[in-house]
Image (tube, rainbow, N blue to C red):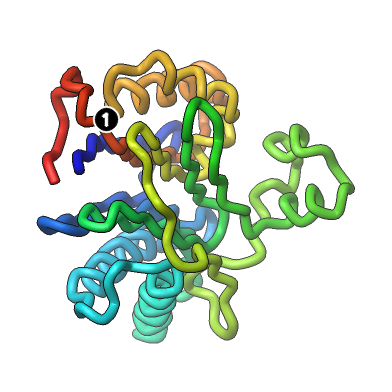
Amino acid sequence: MRLATASLSDRGGRQRNEDAVGDWSSDRLYYFVVADGAGGHGGGDVASAIVVDSVLADLRYLTVAELPPTGQRLVSAIRHANANILEEQARGDAALKDMRSTVVLLAIDCELRTAAWAHCGDSRLYCFRGGQINVQTRDHSLVQDMVDAHLIEPGEARRHPRRNVLLTALGTPGELAIDGLDGTFSLLDRDAFLLCSDGLWEYVDEMCMREALDEAATPDAWLHALAARVRVTAPARHDNFSALAVWIVDPEDTQSTVLKNR
């Protein structure tokens, strides 16, 4: 099984990039994570770095009994990351006491050709199959609840004045809402995953994502097209934006220069 991957992280119109991205792989397993430090709380860059380091370290040592990685196991890794943020908050640094982060996490088992994912907050995972969105995670946000309650139309969510109000984020004491896939997801050749912070999807709608995917020869080209769209449509002081692209490559496709053989 072959994967083609790419990543980007851009500070946008801000002075500091509070997003973090990371990945880890073995002969069998791949993990990908995007975290978005919550702006306005202080220490967002520290929180997102803790999340990435923590979940990758946690999942690196899965036992045979825990394979393949499931959504439930990824939720557990995110809970451990939250505990690490809370521990760092308790050390007493005033700049870090209110730090928060979102997270979206993808695991791929190349031996069994399965994937799993989990997320907290409004960083998203998309899976494109056959040119259509097969999977899209649900934001933990006030505006998403308003969409679900039919108080606003889905198209209004990206520009709603309260779009940035999250209902949950890592670094929050007490019960934490984390959603994970129930079990695993069977992969097909040419499936394409996009993990991204809200700084990207806020300015790139799903139609644009699909069109850019259709035109891209590599994951890197796909992400560069999406980033170009953000820079054209976003205001001057727009948020950081980050993304990871993961393609399940058709064995007959030899065009990509970033293939990883598995």
| On screen, residue 56 above or below 215 | below
Residue 111, percent from left and from top: 21, 56
Image quarter of residue 92: bottom left
Q: Residues within 10 Å of mark 1 (few under 14, many from 20)?
A: some
State the residue in front, 121 or 66: 66
Quick one: 91 or 224, which is closer to the camera?
224
Q: As shown in the figure, which amino acid type bears the numbered disc 1?
A: Asp
Q: Position of residue 258 (x, y in %)?
A: 16, 30
Q: Classify 57 as above or below 147.
A: below
Please say whether residue 93 is visible from this viewpoint. no
Position above or below: 61 against 120: below
**Quadrant that contains the N terminus:** top left
Query: What x and y, as percent, mark residue 36?
Result: 44, 53
In this view, the residue farthest toward the right is: 151
Q: How many marks?
A: 1
Q: Which residue is mark 1?
A: 250
Give the quadrant of residue 190.
top left
Compared to residue 119, the image places residue 251 above or below, namely above
Residue at figure coordinates x 50%, y 16% from the top left: 232
- Residue 170 visible within the image: yes
Residue 49 falls left or right of residue 27: right
Callout 1: SS: loop
Residue 149, percent from left and from top: 85, 54
Quick one: 213 or 171, which is closer to the camera? Answer: 213
Residue at left offset 60%, top offset 67%: 168
